[in-house]
């Protein structure tokens, strides 16, 4: 969802920044990309706090970050127009699954806001799995819920951790350069700037 359907990474970064600021911790964009982008909030906190050697309460930080993001989502998050159009077109002929590291509350808020709930027959969120991306669990679960072999599925990702999860699940992966430059997405089978139904018809 984030970085593929909606341009939400700046809002996530701001929500994390607001969470850490009262604690005297300055989160840089580079640190956000390294420790948080493409991961569950929990895993991001675990990795970042270990890096800065600050044993803080992760559950409390998650709740604060979620609150900060919910305030931002209604005004700062916008969809990628070509992606929304592509989803609408693909959903006519193909079953679609949304596989995201975001919590269900954020997923529902965004899908409802842009009228996309009806296009996805399967939703896999942060609460659906034990191990988040880059572990393949979320993509394997999505394939199982779709009733399709993973090898018959195409994943769309924007971050290295998501690409790794898709490839480890045995899926073909298309990567978008919305969040990272193409040189960081080399593990994907195809790297593109934007999506279209015609792209998938040729795969």
Image (spheres, helix red, strand yellow):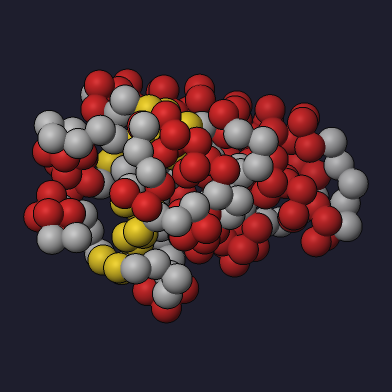
Q: Quadrant of the C terminus?
A: bottom left
Residue 90 horizontal side relative to residue 48, left or right? left
User: Residue 92, how many percent across, how many down?
Assistant: 12, 32
Residue at 17% in and 48% down = 82
Q: Quadrant of the N terminus?
A: top left
Residue at 31% in and 49% down = 152
User: Residue 173, how many percent across, how many down?
Assistant: 36, 59
Residue 151 horizontal side relative to residue 70, left or right? left
- When the figure is inspected, residue 71 is found, relative to residue 151, above or below; the finding is above
Looking at the picture, tell me which residue is in the foreground, 190 or 55: 190
Q: Quadrant of residue 58?
A: top right
- When the figure is inspected, residue 35 is found, relative to residue 16, above or below; the finding is below
Residue at 50% in and 22% down = 105
- When the figure is inspected, residue 190 is found, relative to residue 50, above or below; the finding is below
Residue at 76% in and 41% down = 22
User: Residue 157, how many percent across, how many down?
Assistant: 39, 54
- When the figure is inspected, residue 4 is found, relative to residue 129, above or below; the finding is below
Looking at the picture, tell me which residue is in the foreground, 151 or 48: 151
User: Residue 159, how many percent across, how many down?
Assistant: 47, 59
Looking at the picture, tell me which residue is in the foreground, 33 or 182: 182
Q: How many numbered tags mark residues here? A: 0
Q: Does any portion of residue 71 appear in the rendered image?
A: no
Q: Does any portion of residue 172 appear in the rendered image?
A: yes
Looking at the picture, tell me which residue is in the foreground, 197 or 62: 197
């Amino acid at each position: 969802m984030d970085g593929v359907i909606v341009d939400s990474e700046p809002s996530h970064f701001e929500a994390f920044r607001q969470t850490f600021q009262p604690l005297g911790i300055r989160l840089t964009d580079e640190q956000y990309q390294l420790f948080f982008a493409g991961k569950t909030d929990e895993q991001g906190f675990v990795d970042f706090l270990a890096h800065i050697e600050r044993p803080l309460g992760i559950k409390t930080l998650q709740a604060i970050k979620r609150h900060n993001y919910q305030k931002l989502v209604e005004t700062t998050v916008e969809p990628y127009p070509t992606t929304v159009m592509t989803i609408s077109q693909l959903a006519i002929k193909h079953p679609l699954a949304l596989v995201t590291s975001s919590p269900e509350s954020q997923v529902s808020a965004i899908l409802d806001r842009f009228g996309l709930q009806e296009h996805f027959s399967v939703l896999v969120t942060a609460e659906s799995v034990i191990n988040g991306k880059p572990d393949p669990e979320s993509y394997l679960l999505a394939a199982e819920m779709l009733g399709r072999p993973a090898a018959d599925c195409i994943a769309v990702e924007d971050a290295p951790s998501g690409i790794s999860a898709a490839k480890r699940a045995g899926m073909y992966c298309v990567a978008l350069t919305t969040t990272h430059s193409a040189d960081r997405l080399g593990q994907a089978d195809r790297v593109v700037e934007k999506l279209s139904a015609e792209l998938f018809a040729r795969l």
